[in-house]
Amino acid sequence: KHTMKRIVFLLMAILLQVGVAWAQTDGHLPVSILSASHAMMRLQTDKHYLLIPVEEKESDSKIRIIKDGVCLETLNVRVATGKADYFVPIDLTRYGKGSVLVEMTFNGSYRTVGNIEDYSCWKLMKLSDTFDTANREQWRPTYHHTPVWGWMNDPNGMFYKDGVWHIYYQHNLYGSIWGNISWGHSTSTDLIHWKNEPEAIYPDALGLVFSGSAVVDEGNTAGFGKDAVVAMYTSADASQTQSLAYSTDNGKTFKKYEYNPVVTSNVPDFRDPNMFWNDSTKEWNLVIAAGQKMNFYSSKNLKDWHFESSFGEGYGCHKGVWECPDMMQMANGKWVLICNINPGGPYGGSATQYFVGHWDGHQFTCESKPETTKWLDYGKDHYATVTFSGAPNGRHVALAWMSNWQYAAVVPTKQFRSANSIPRDLDLFSDGGEDYVSVKPSPEVLSAFRCKAAGLDDACLIEVSRLRPNATIELSNGKGERVVMRYNAQEQSFSFDRMKAGESDFSDVFPCVTMAPTHGRVNKVLIFIDKSSIEVFDADGKFALTNLVFPSTPYNHLSVKGGKAKISKM
Ligand code: FRU
């Protein structure tokens, strides 16, 4: 009897141990908890996804995917310990047949309460063949490009080929803040409807996949194949180096180049390579942001790059790091160097400046005085602007990331964060002896707004013509939220006031008034409204203002004093 009791006791003790060590009760995943901050589980990869609950207020946990003793991937995810804000999918099909070991290391010192055994993630994590991507966001734009889920910053590697516009973008698949950066991919045939494509370029041992560009190598100069899409991006780890990847299936899948990295430097901020073809020298050129300068290179084969020169010292705005360059030759032969800068923008944080000048294949010469600063957009949410390579008819079609590093990570969306601007066509105009870049909504976008609307909508275009000198345009809703735009002909300015536009408690620097110089008389403005953004363009392209707004209910009242308004829908 005694022995019986002992056996039962022993059995119970063992069961208890097992229960603590293997939290695999009632159908949950077979987690083995190894310490207060460390756990592992072996998973079969026959299901498509491992769904991880994310809690935005948590700090990052490190997740390693291990197969046959090799770490295939390291991810940083704010794994939920309490309430799950949303789920992110780890795509298990990428790891091949069989099983993987998923290791999770929690940031132990950060936690002051709770036992690892009690974390909600053990109950919430699940294997699934599906991941629900239905939109859950009130402020997700209708006709602007957004990631289906996760964080997005800069547009990258954009190119046009065979009637298709390709956007890649800085993407976090595992949360709606910056991190785990890979290149997401979307395509469009009309610059308005975007199709989500499989992730294009994932991080590797050289680092995260930062911003870059892509070109179509028509002449097979690199030897990757005729018409191969060749992308160059920054591999960001202990150093920032430049790597190549190429695609022989029109940008769907990429192979990394064996001899990466192809360009290195000891400058710490050395990134965002932008390649372009130079028809006069019949060579490829490359511009890379290097601290507060732009470095230029040349190449015959896209692989071996020769340093030519630097531009930037003493020119334009230097109140932040120079990033995301782009170079293009305009119809009149002049060159425009786009130079995104963060911080240092006219209204704080991120913005896009540019220089107009000449490029001879070796050196960029700016034609303005060094102290001249030119901004491409006078809103607060217009950054990382670059253009599509190979756009038809010599067009320069640009996209900007519609946010600002000051608050991009805390804007009130969760399933995804950030949208891109509408595509814009760039050209030049002159005023007072200076050339400026003109910015107009791309014709494809304009022609999408075909139907006359009865009133304001949360996705519409307002055209205000016959603008009088002190015109005001006000959008408002029943909650007392409003956006006020004012044209001041005397001061030659057009302002945009979002002080009381809607939700703004996520950032002190969100409420603001931004103002554009109008370079003369304004006759007509085009105002693109979407669920959480307003983009205003002078119809002649002399200024643009791009701003986010988060009205708690859509603006449904328009008041125009000093102009004639017409509202169109898609
Ligand atoms: C600009 C930027 C780039 C960099 C990328 C990283 O917003 O800082 O310079 O490549 O974001 O995501």
Image (spheres, rainbow, N blue to C red):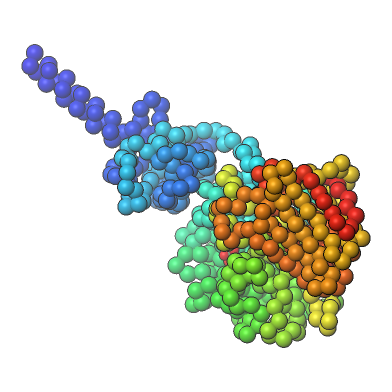
**Which of the 4 image quadrants contains residue 279?**
bottom right
**Is residue 136 at least partly visible in the picture?**
yes
Give the quadrant of the C terminus.
top right
Instruction: Tell me residue 180's x, y (percent).
Output: 51, 54
The spot of residue 469 in percent (x, y) is 87, 66
Residue 471 placement, left or right of 121: right
**On-image quarter of the N terminus:** top left
Where is residue 98 drawn, in percent x and y?
45, 38
Total numbered labels: 0
Question: Which residue ends up furthest to the right in the rendered image?
Answer: 466
What residue appears at the point 33 percent right and 32 percent down from the top-left corner? 23
Q: Is residue 539 left or right of residue 168?
A: right
Task: Give the camera-side residue of 320 and 511.
Answer: 511
Q: Left or right? Give the position of 364 relative to 526.
A: left
Q: In the image shown, does 178 or 229 lie closer to the viewer?
A: 178
Quarter holding residue 414 = top right
Q: Is residue 120 above or below residue 548?
A: above
Residue drawn at 57 percent across, 52 percent down: 505
Which residue is pictured at 78% across the width and 54% down the height?
A: 474
Q: Quadrant of residue 113?
A: top left
